[in-house]
Each structure stands twice: as structure tokens, then as C-alpha cells.
Image (cartoon, coloured by chain):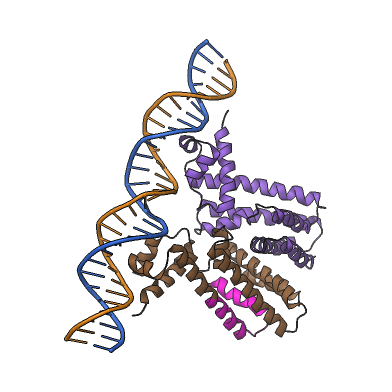
Chain colours: A purple, B brown, C orange, D blue
Amino acid sequence: MATRARQRLLDTAEELFYAEGVRAVGLERILAESGAGRASFYRHFEGKNDLVAAVLRRRDEAWRAWLDERVTALGGGPLAVFDALAERFARADFRGCAFINTMVESADPESAAHKIADEHKKRVTGYVAGLLRNDGAADPEGTAARFVLLMDGAIVTALRERTTEAAARAKELASALL
Amino acid sequence: MATRARQRLLDTAEELFYAEGVRAVGLERILAESGAGRASFYRHFEGKNDLVAAVLRRRDEAWRAWLDERVTALGGGPLAVFDALAERFARADFRGCAFINTMVESADPESAAHKIADEHKKRVTGYVAGLLRNDGAADPEGTAARFVLLMDGAIVTALRERTTEAAARAKELASALL
DNA sequence: TGCGAATGGAACCGATCGGTACCGTTTGAT
DNA sequence: ATCAAACGGTACCGATCGGTTCCATTCGCA
């Protein structure tokens, strides 16, 4: 059995936090929907904040692995990140970027959640810089920062419009940089 | 006296909601910091949701009036919107876009708050389209949509980096569209 | 000055928040 | 079959949530 409750708690929390927001989802909900007992939760996590941090850390890894997998499958060029985003936008459960959402919700920049979200964006920027470097682009770091600005703009726009169009608009803007 | 309590409630709520998030701020806080009594609040508003909607409606008007004022002062061209944003990013109390934040926080697209936020972005897009039309740009509507994507990307990036740089990056990307 | 409208303060409500302690049961390796 | 670790369920706790009601006071206008 090891720690099956921990997995279920993480899975349920990630789904609910992303769908409705961290603050909107109480422990009660997470316990009920995961089927875990209250004591089990506190055996695996120090508290809600710790659960939030664990969910975000896991999602950071999974999201970047997913991005790398899709970018590779879509040709491996830097512009493929926008095609990958378009796939994400098309999903019925798309609710923006969990890390942008976290920075909006947990206003305090010193909170653990905020810092993890910040780290995530830096890692994604580094990944995009690598794609640009492989592509022989000039100033990979500076261009990566612009790519991420376009990615975040596309994500926010897609959240609002509930369409994949924003990905194409951002891709077109990005292609002018190459 | 008329309705001084209403004004104070709106002012206090706007400040606290923007700084810490709607969900993070309870009525208790708003009443204490505005100096209004509980009964006064319910005489002016149906409930918290109604207060949130009133705050957002007022902010929509004020924000677009501010944008128009700054854009005019900064030359009146479409690219001036990014210079205006840079001013906003420099403010110590900058905490992103209240309407993006609202759409992140109030996940339900059918909620009044969500709809007001959606309306706000459409109005801003219309305003930018007008600037582009005055500038003789081709496809003002399509270009305005790209401008707003860049504006939102810059806002989210500025929230993360706590710098005005993102405005310059977005302006540079936008200028390629003209 | 007087009068009615608008006000601030407080007591209270049920519900839910995050968190703690204890219970009996299930589970998987030995 | 045994046994300890991990488990789900329940009863609590104080604090706070949004919301309702009542009352004494303050205020602006006639």
C-alpha cells in the first residue's frame, strides 16, 4: 500500500485546485472526493499550504515533461511551443496556467506557492531558450523572454475567449522574431 | 451625507480586492477598514457578490478613462498603450490586471464578475481598434486582438518580474505589426 | 431648531474553514 | 496466520465566513 492515500490526495487536489482555485477548495472537499481520511492527510502533509506546494511541484515537472514531449512530436522547433499550447487550449478542462493562477491567487510574493510558480516560469523560459539555441537563433535568452510573454498572453487570452485562436496569433507574432 | 458609506465601501473593497484577491478579503475586513457598519453595507449592496460587481464596473470605467488620458498625453498613437502600461507597472501597488485576476479567481464563466471582466477586455480591445483605425492601420480589429494579447502578456509578465521591462518587450513586438 | 434619513455598533445565526486527537479496520509483507 | 503500518471515519476545536436583525446615534436639510 505504501502511500496510496498520498497519491489520491495529490491527484484530487491538483484537479480541484486547477478547476476552481486553491482558495475556493476546502480540505473537506479534497478529503471527500479523494476518499482519504482526515488523519491520513495530516500524516502525509503538514497542512494545506504544504499540499498546495506539493501539487505545484509535481505539476511543474509534469507540465514541462509534457511540453518537451509535444514540442518534439511537433517538429522540435521553438515555434512548436505554440502548437503545443493550442492542444492545451482545446481541452475542455483548460483553465489557464496553474502557475499564473497561483501568482494571482496567492498575492504574497514570499509564499511558497508564489515562489514555486516563479521558478516554473523561469524553467520554462530556460527550456525555450534551449530550443532557440538549437535553432541557431541570435540572443536566445532575450528571445525566450519574448516567447514566454507571448505564451502567457496567449494563455490568458485563451482563458477568456475559450478558443485556440490565441495560440495561432501568438505564434505568428513569435515567428517575426526569428 | 447621501451615501457616503457606499463610497467608502467601494473604495476600501477595490483596494483590498485588488491587493489581496476577492476571496482572500472577508466582509469583516472591509467593514473594519472602511469604518462602515454591517447594516449600512447591506442597505447599499445585496451581498458580497453585488459589491464585487459594483467595484469591477466602476474600475472598468475608471481604468479605460485612465488609459485614454495617458495614451492621449503620450502622443495618441496605438503604441502609446504600452507606454501607459509601463507607468502602471512602475507603481508600488501594481498587482496585475484586476479583470484577469477576477477571471482566474471566479472560475465560473457564468458569474457576474466573470462577465464584467470579459466585457472590460472587449471594450479595451474596441478602444485599441479605434486607435489603430485613426492611425490608418490595416485590419484594425485583428491587430487590436493581437495588441491586447501583448498587453495581457506584458501584464502577467510584469506581475511576475516586478519590472517595467515587459512593457518595452511587448511594445517592440507590437511595432512589428504596424 | 427640529425631524427623518442615513449611519455605526453589536448580538446573533448556521455553515464552513484549517487543524487535532482518537477510534477501529484494512492492508501487505513476513 | 501474524503483526505493525497505513488507513478511513468521527467527534471535536476555535476562528471566520456571509448574512440578518435591532438599536442608539449622527447627520443634513427644511
- Residue B92 seen by the camera: no
Q: Is residue B68 magenta?
A: yes
Q: Position of residue C30 (x, y in %)?
A: 57, 15
Region of the chain picked out in magenta, as a range: B61-90
Q: Quadrant of the C terminus of chain B?
A: bottom right
Q: In terms of depth relative to the viewer, which is nearer, A45 or A118?
A: A45
Quadrant hosting residue A79: bottom right
Q: Position of residue A164 (x, y in %)?
A: 72, 60
Left or right of residue A26, residue A123 in this image: right
Q: Residue D14: x, y in percent?
A: 32, 47
Residue toward you, B128 or A29? A29
Q: Residue at x 78, y 63 (%)?
A: A138
Work out whether A146 lies above or below D8.
below
Horizontal relation, residue A34 to residue A153: left or right = left
Pick the front one: A71 or B122: B122
Where residue A81 sits, quadrant-wise, is bottom right
Q: Residue at x 73, y 64 (%)?
A: A170
**What residue appears at the point 59 percent right and 42 percent down from the top-left corner?**
A11
Residue plotted at (82% across, 59% down): A136
Is residue B69 visible in the rendered image? The answer is yes
Residue B170, relative to residue A147: is it above or below? below
Q: Quarter of the image containing the N terminus of chain B?
A: bottom left
